[in-house]
Image: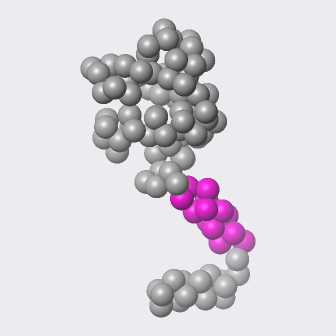
Amino acid sequence: MDKKDIIIRIGQIRQRANLSARDLSLKIGKNSACISRLESKDSFEPSVSVLLDIISVCGSTESEFFYYDIQQYQKDKEIIELLKTASPIKKDSIINLLKNR
């Protein structure tokens, strides 16, 4: 994930949290234009602590934020949790099912 992807992802989670750029800026303790400058791809680069604050305020997690497909994160997470409790036979069946699409 590069800087451009991070900026896009910030916009996605901010919108999903129904926060304006101004509201998010204020909630993380920054001036009201902080997130607008960031999302406009200005030279502003957030520190790790600011990025973590943004993620938290938007109701996300680091794992979700950096996941390759944020739209599928919850479904993929649920599948993984279900697989953890599946028997070896069920796991083999699922693997075969997915391989033989």
Using the rendered image of the protein, determine whether residue 84 is visible from the camera's viewpoint: no
Query: Horizontally, is 86 left or right of 32 in the view?
Result: right
Tell me which corner region of the image, top left, top right, bottom left or bottom right, holds residue 88: bottom right
29 relative to 66, above or below? above
Using the rendered image of the protein, determine whether residue 38 is visible from the camera's viewpoint: yes
Query: Horizontally, is 48 left or right of 84 in the view?
Result: left
35 relative to 8, above or below? above
Image spot of residue 61 (x, y percent): 58, 40
Of 44 and 16, nearer the camera is: 16
Residue at the image position 69 percent from the left and 69 percent from the top: 82
The residue range painted magenta reads 72-85
Tell me which corner region of the image, top left, top right, bottom left or bottom right, holds residue 18: top right
Image spot of residue 1 (x, y percent): 34, 45
Residue at the image position 27 percent from the left and 20 percent from the top: 43
59 relative to 93, above or below? above
Residue at the image position 37 percent from the left and 19 percent from the top: 37
In the orientation shown, which residue stands out farthest toward the left?
Answer: 43
Residue at the image position 54 percent from the left and 36 percent from the top: 15
Main secondary structure of the magenta stretch: helix
Image spot of residue 16 (x, y percent): 58, 40
Image spot of residue 95 (x, y percent): 54, 83
Is 83 contained in the magenta span?
A: yes
